[in-house]
Amino acid sequence: MKVIVDNKIPYIKGLIETLADEVIYLPGKDFTPEVVKEADALIIRTRTLCNRQLLEGSKVQFIGTATIGFDHIDTKYCQEAGITWNNCPGCNAGAVEQYVHAVLLLLQQEKGLQLKRACLGIVGVGHVGERIRRMAERIGMKVLLNDPPRANAGEQGFTSLDTLAEQCDILTFHTPLIREGKSKTFLLANRTFFQQLQRKPYLLNTSRGEVVETEALLNALNTGAVAGAVIDVWENEPHINRKLLDKVFIGTPHIAGYSADGKANATRMVLEAFCRFFHKPMNFHLTLPEVSRQSLSGDENLQLLQQYNPHTDCDHLRAHPELFEQLRGDYPLRRE
């Protein structure tokens, strides 16, 4: 059995070799039709577009993406071709919670936003959005939730995007990228959306870059329709808009979910899916070393910012925006 693996997936080397006869590691962008033609399985990240162009005529039976999102997989073609695919829902939810929590504390410290008096609007309440909800309520924030697919399925507790635009001081996006249909999220935050905002909120996007329209956000920042923005995911990555990077409160290179814990979860989940599909025993063991927290402050908020402060990643990106992909690919995974 031949498996091709994205060479930026951590903790997988030495484990997948016990499950396959031949393993090839490549950068995600180097998966070509010629390369994958004789492969039985692909283990990828978001940088590999798995569509008819890549897969037609190949032996590929299984695709595992070590990510929550799967908009880089043409699921319709996979169904036609009889290719099974798996993503890793919730794998990095803890890491994104850590990132958003740190951002909220920085907004309070540096922008004077009183979190216990603020209203947080969460757009997209899946694994990640649910973690954000629990964290925000724990620190005393009022929380409004928007998730049309869940609301349309009859679940309670959700409200409209218009209500969030009217009442929220902070809006944070955690939706998948859906390009068409009833629950479309492509350019969800567009010029019309920004014109509806009532409270000059801060906007956070850690979902997908194409959920927020860049030019509309720039205009909203310039006119004061939003007080500021925190952007981890960008349109046209890795060729991000430099003007937007200069304008945002914090801008980072798509690393909100990049903790060692989250990456280990994803690798474990994708290997488990691989084993289930190919009827392999799950004999692998993936463990991370214990982290010493003895030198951290006793104050929970200070402790969190000692563990992770997104300003550091923002400084690195602002210094070298042309290295977006390298900063992301070689990111020193933090602990939660």
Image (spheres, rainbow, N blue to C red):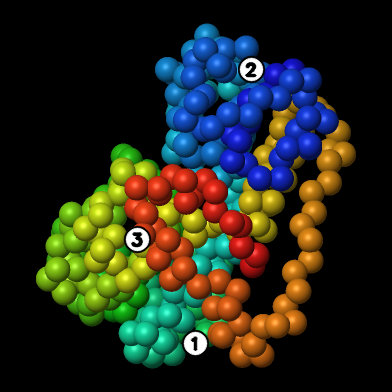
| Cα distance between the residues tagged 2 and 3 | 39 Å
Quadrant of image for the N terminus: top right
The label on residue 318 is 3
| Cα distance between the residues tagged 1 and 3 | 33 Å
The residue closer to the viewer here, 7 or 152, is 7
Q: Earlier in the sequence, mark 1 or mark 2?
A: 2
Name the element at disc 2.
Answer: loop
Q: How many marks?
A: 3
Name the element at disc 1.
Answer: loop
The x, y position of residue 205, in whole percent, is 37, 61
Q: Please indicate, yes or no, whether residue 218 appears anywhere in the rendered image.
A: yes
Q: Amino acid at mark 1?
A: Gly
> Which residue is located at x 52 percent, y 12 percent?
34
| Cα distance between the residues tagged 1 and 2 | 51 Å
The label on residue 121 is none
The x, y position of residue 46, in whole percent, is 49, 39
> Which residue is located at x 47 percent, y 36 percent?
47
Q: Decide if residue 126 is on the left or right side of residue 3.
A: left
Q: Is residue 152 above or below residue 75?
A: below
> Which residue is located at x 46 percent, y 63 percent?
313
Residue 334, located in which quarter of the rendered image?
bottom right
Q: Which residue is mark 2?
A: 39
Quadrant of image for the C terminus: bottom right
The label on residue 140 is 1
Q: Label 2: how many residues lie within 10 Å, few (<14), some (14-19) or many (20+)?
A: many
Q: Amino acid at mark 3?
A: Arg
